Amino acid sequence: MSFMKGDLLTRTRKLVKGLAMAEPVWLKAMEQAPPANFPRAESKVKPISLPEDVYIKKFYKKHPDSKYEDAFKFCDFDPPPARVFGCRVLDLKEQGVTEEEAMAMADMEYRLEKKGENKAYGRLRQIARLQGKKPPPNPYPSAIKEIQAEERKLVRDRFFNPDVLKIMEKLKEERAAEMHDRTRGGRGAW
């Protein structure tokens, strides 16, 4: 029935009318109360675009590392820096500043914020050194470093976890047995 056009009711009517199918019990009830027809999109679904999207693209062109440094977090209440940049440019434009000046000011604010984060962490490390303590982890880590920190546990785990070590020993034994069979089988065949 996939080659016929129409919904289930129309297809079934055609099959019954053409005597290709016996009339189902539910057909009369369905003709009296047909199912709801939901409208279909006539064309492709249009992408959603926000007014600040133009400035977000410009931000990423100017700061391509920001895609990796300031990753988008779904559970975070704070918007990513690119969205803050775009909204700030729009706010400045509403206040009567030209687009170029607004972008320059928003860019300067972004750079100052980044510089402030780096200074704050540098000061934390300096205080820890003066106290003779281990420096604290960076409160503003990049997304790449966060992922590497998560993976570091797994990498270490493969060398020290007894279950993993057992599996590795088993694989080594199987490989050694396979090599032994190959060398033994190779001599006897000549």
Image (cartoon, grey):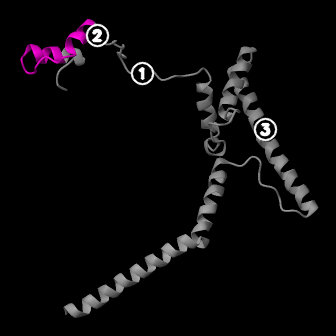
Q: Earlier in the sequence, mark 2 or mark 1?
A: 2
Question: Which is more foreground, mark 2 or mark 1?
Answer: 2
Neighbours of disc 1 within 10 Å: few (<14), some (14-19), many (20+): few
Looking at the image, residue 115 lies above or below residue 49? below
**In the image, 1: left or right of 147?**
left
Neighbours of disc 2 within 10 Å: few (<14), some (14-19), many (20+): few
Q: Which residue is mark 1?
A: 45
Looking at the image, residue 44 lies above or below residue 36? below
Distance (Cα) linking label 2 and label 1 = 28 Å
Q: Quadrant location of the N terminus?
A: top left
Q: Position of residue 114 (x, y in %)?
A: 76, 41
Q: Which residue is mark 2?
A: 34
Q: Earlier in the sequence, mark 2 or mark 3?
A: 2
Q: Amino acid at mark 1?
A: Val
Looking at the image, residue 110 lies above or below residue 158? above
Q: State the extent of the magenta-drawn residues as a range.
A: 12-32
**Magenta-drawn stretch contains 28:** yes
Looking at the image, residue 122 lies above or below residue 96? below
Quadrant in the picture for residue 13: top left
Tag shown at residue 113: 3
Front-most of residues 122 and 32 = 32
Q: Amino acid at mark 2?
A: Pro
Question: Which is more foreground, mark 2 or mark 3?
Answer: 2
